[in-house]
Amino acid sequence: MGMEFKSGFAQSIESYLEYRDGMHYGGGGERKYLLSFDQYCAEHFPGENSLTKETVRSWFSSEIARGHRALENKATTIRMFARYLGPSSYILPMNFVPKVPQYVPYIMTDDELRALFFAADRLSMHRLTPFLDETIPFLLRFIYACGLRPGEALRLKVDDVDLKTGEVFIRNTKRHKDRIIAASEDVKDLLKQFDMKRKIAVGKSEFFFCNQDGTQLKLHHLDQAVKQCWQDAHPGIDPKELPRIRAYDLRHRFASAVLQGWIDGGKNLYVMLPYLRAYMGHQSFSDTVYYIHLLPDRLMKSPGIDWEKIDRVGLEADLWLD
C-alpha cells in the first residue's frame, strides 16, 4: 500500500479511503493527495485531528507556493474528506484554487534569493550576448526591489529614469496604464552605478538595460540568465530536481515580502493593499489579494487575517500573467 499515514488524521484517512473503495470511487490519486496532507500535518500540526481552516489552508497554500500540480484534484479530495468527517470540518472554498496556469510561481526564501544574486554577480554568459554578464546583477536586483514585470524593466528607457529623484516612469504596461514608482535610496544608487557602467561599455543608448549595441535586451535572454543563476546557486544538485523559476518570480517574491513585512509590523492589510496594488500596476484588487495565498505558513496563523472577507473578494486574477 506504500507509505503509511502517521498524522493525527491517519485513522480517519484510512477509514475514508475504505469508504471510497467500498463505493467504487477510490483511486490512487486520492491516497497520494491525502498522504501529502498527512505528511504535512505530521510535521506542522502534530497531534491535530480536527480538520480546521488553519490546517487545510496551510497545507494547500504550501502546495501552491511549491509549484505542485493537480491542485484542483487535491482541493476536491480535501473537500470530500471534510464532508466525510462531518459538519464541523472546514471545507476549502472553491475560489481558493487558482486557475490552471502554464506556470506556478515559486516563492524563494531569503537564502535562495541571496544565493541567486550571488550567482548573478558571477555569471558568465557573455557569449549569449555581450554585456549580459554586467547587466544581469543590476537588472535582477532592480526587478525584485521594485516588484516590476520583467518586460517593464526591459522596456525602460534612459529618459524614464530620474537618477536625482529616484522616480521611474513605467510606460506601456500590460494594461496600457502608465505609472510612476519611487525607487529607494539603495535602488537609486544601484541605478546610478549601472548607468555609469552602461555609458562606459555601450555609449549612447535609448534603453536603460540594453545589449552591447544599445538595442533592447530580450526577455528570453533574461530568463536564460535567471535559469543559469538558479543552477549556479545550487551546485551539486541536478537541475532537473530544482524548482522551476523565471524572472517573473522576483516580482512574486517582492509582493510576498511586502505583505509579510506589513503583517509582521502589525499593519492593517485592508488599508495597505491598495498601495501595493497601485505600486505593482494591478488592474483589479483581486490580483493583489491573491498574493496572500502564496505567503508562508505563519500567515495562516495570523489572527489579523479575516479569511472570510478575503474569500468574498473573488479571486479571478490570472496572477501568473500579471
Image (cartoon, grey):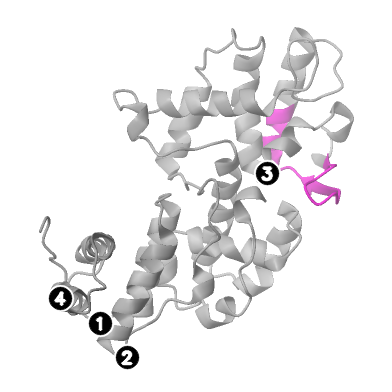
Look at the numbered discs 1 and 3 and tell me whether their residues touch, using CB distance below 8 Å: no
Residue at the disc numbered 3: 146
Residue type at mark 1 is Ser
How many numbered discs?
4
Look at the numbered discs 4 and 2 and tell me whether their residues touch, using CB distance below 8 Å: no
Residue farthest to the right, as pictured: 159
Give residue 1's position: percent from left, percent from top.
10, 59
From the viewer's perspective, is 63 left or right of 225?
Answer: left
- Which callout, 1 or 4, points at the residue further toward the start of the chain? 4
Within 10 angstroms of label 2, few (less than 14), some, or many (20 or more) residues? few
Give residue 39's position: percent from left, percent from top.
21, 61
- The CA distance from mark 1 to mark 2 is 8 Å
Depth order, front residue of 225/81: 81
- The CA distance from mark 4 to mark 2 is 21 Å
Q: Residue at x 73, y 35 (%)?
A: 153
- Which callout, 3 or 4, points at the residue further toward the start of the chain? 4
Look at the numbered discs 1 and 2 and tell me whether their residues touch, using CB distance below 8 Å: yes
Q: Which residues are magenta?
A: 169-191
